[in-house]
Image (cartoon, rainbow, N blue to C red):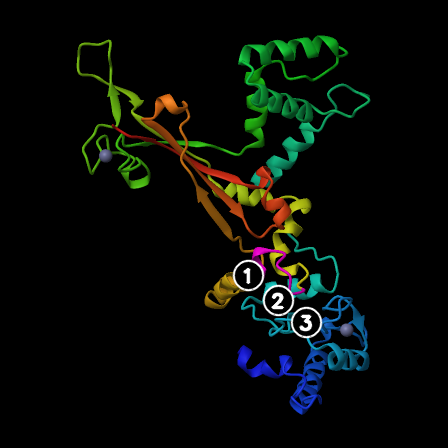
């Protein structure tokens, strides 16, 4: 069914001010269609798709009220696919069930236990949520304390040594049964356990290629033949070291995206682009024509609401200030646009995808 066949939905009033008979027929067909789909009925009632602020597929009413609402207010904009009334433009039957169930406000258990990686994360989180000392008045956990300390370290640029000494001081101040992390090293180990890995990938000094996957075995750039590794300075022999000229940091995206789906707190927001209120005001990038155009062009991708849409941005900066002009770094930042705008702007939901060091020879 194309949008064209449902033009009548938004052609309610004729030029002479009367209701279009096509619209009345269409509404009757619509109600009949919805009633053939018992999974979207609430006893005899349906979601009202009229454009009244209180309805818009949220309010559940009987069919006669819905008909009069539709006559008075018309359909909520852009409701060409009747997914609240049993229709799918979703090719996957399991997702269809999911949408219908959630849109009726039922709690659906999709029936899967967490996979081993997620289970590992949950275990670690549980362990780190243990109180830093039993009965501390602010309910601080080991994780909350070290997260705070790491934040302070980053903000005030304090050294690892200061960090270690602070840990020791704090530990001395607490009752003896505390589980305060004792150094920067053990903090890093704890945080690494929470596991968002970083990969360092060697790259050509001139920026032609990275030594990755099938090129992993190479020792010279395949474009400019520059060697991958530095020569040892101290030995006279031409022996090579394993210190590469240049490295790129890569922050694998998949586990970070999986993380967004590992918690109830974020999962529901990942459907925001589809479920947020539409009232003709631009509230989310998904209200824009370009987003809608994308949905039409790639309808199969768009039909799965949980598919992740990413925005990518990058800009170069000079890590060593204006004096080190020959050095620059290019962080590539990826933002999931599924989230509500107020979350997209928070840095915990922006992923640093990679840092590409570049070198200019002046
Ligand atoms: Zn209504
Ligand atoms: Zn090269």
* Pair 2/1: label in front: 1
Q: In this rendering, would 247 be left or right of 307?
A: left
Q: Which quarter of the picture shows residue 346?
A: top right
Picture residue at 70% right of the left edge, 61% below the top:
102
Q: Is residue 323 above or below residue 299?
A: above
Queried whether the magenta region covers residue 153, the answer comes back as no
Q: Position of residue 244 (x, y in %)?
A: 30, 24
Magenta range is 279-288
In depth, the one of 260 and 10 nearer the eye is 10
Q: Which mark is residue 96?
A: 2
Q: Earlier in the sequence, mark 3 or mark 2?
A: 3
Instruction: Give the distance between the C-alpha atoms of the residues marked 2 and 1, in whole angstroms.
Output: 25 Å
Q: Position of residue 191 (x, y in %)?
A: 58, 27
Instruction: Give the distance between the C-alpha atoms of the residues marked 3 and 1, in whole angstroms.
Output: 17 Å
Residue identified by numbered label 3: 76
Queried whether the magenta region covers residue 285, the answer comes back as yes
Picture residue at 49% right of the left edge, 33% below the top:
197
Instruction: Give the secondary structure at mark 2.
Output: helix
């Amino acid at each position: 069914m194309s949008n064209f066949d449902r033009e009548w939905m938004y052609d309610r009033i004729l030029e002479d001010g009367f209701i279009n008979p096509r619209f009345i027929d269409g509404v009757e067909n619509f109600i009949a269609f919805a009633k053939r789909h018992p999974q979207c009925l609430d006893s005899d009632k349906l979601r009202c798709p009229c454009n009244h602020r209180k309805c818009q597929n949220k309010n559940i009413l009987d069919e006669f009220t819905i008909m009069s609402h539709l006559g008075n207010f018309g359909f909520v904009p852009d409701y060409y696919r009747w997914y609240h009334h049993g229709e799918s433009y979703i090719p996957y039957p399991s997702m269809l069930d999911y949408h219908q169930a959630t849109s009726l406000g039922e709690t659906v258990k999709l029936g899967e236990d967490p996979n081993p990686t997620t289970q590992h994360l949950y275990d670690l989180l549980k362990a780190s949520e243990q109180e830093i000392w039993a009965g501390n008045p602010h309910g601080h956990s080991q994780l909350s304390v070290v997260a705070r300390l790491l934040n302070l370290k980053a903000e005030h640029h304090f050294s690892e040594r200061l960090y270690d000494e602070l840990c020791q001081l704090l530990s001395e101040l607490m009752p003896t049964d505390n589980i305060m992390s004792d150094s920067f090293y053990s903090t890093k180990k704890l945080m690494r356990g929470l596991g968002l890995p970083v990969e360092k990938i060697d790259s050509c000094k001139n920026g032609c290629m990275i030594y990755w996957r099938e090129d992993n075995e190479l020792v010279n750039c395949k474009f400019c033949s520059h060697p991958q590794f530095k020569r040892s300075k101290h030995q006279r022999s031409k022996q090579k070291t394993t210190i590469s000229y240049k490295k790129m940091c890569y922050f694998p995206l998949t586990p970070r995206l999986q993380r967004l789906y590992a918690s109830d707190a974020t999962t529901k927001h990942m459907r925001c682009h589809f479920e947020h209120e539409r009232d003709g005001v631009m509230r989310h990038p998904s209200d824009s024509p370009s987003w809608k155009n994308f949905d039409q062009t790639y309808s199969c991708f768009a039909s799965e609401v949980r598919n992740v849409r990413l925005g990518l941005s990058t800009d170069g900066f000079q890590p060593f200030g204006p004096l080190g002009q020959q050095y620059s770094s290019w962080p590539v930042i990826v933002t999931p646009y599924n989230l509500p705008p107020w979350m997209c702007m928070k840095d915990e939901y922006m992923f640093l995808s990679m840092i590409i060091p570049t070198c200019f020879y002046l």
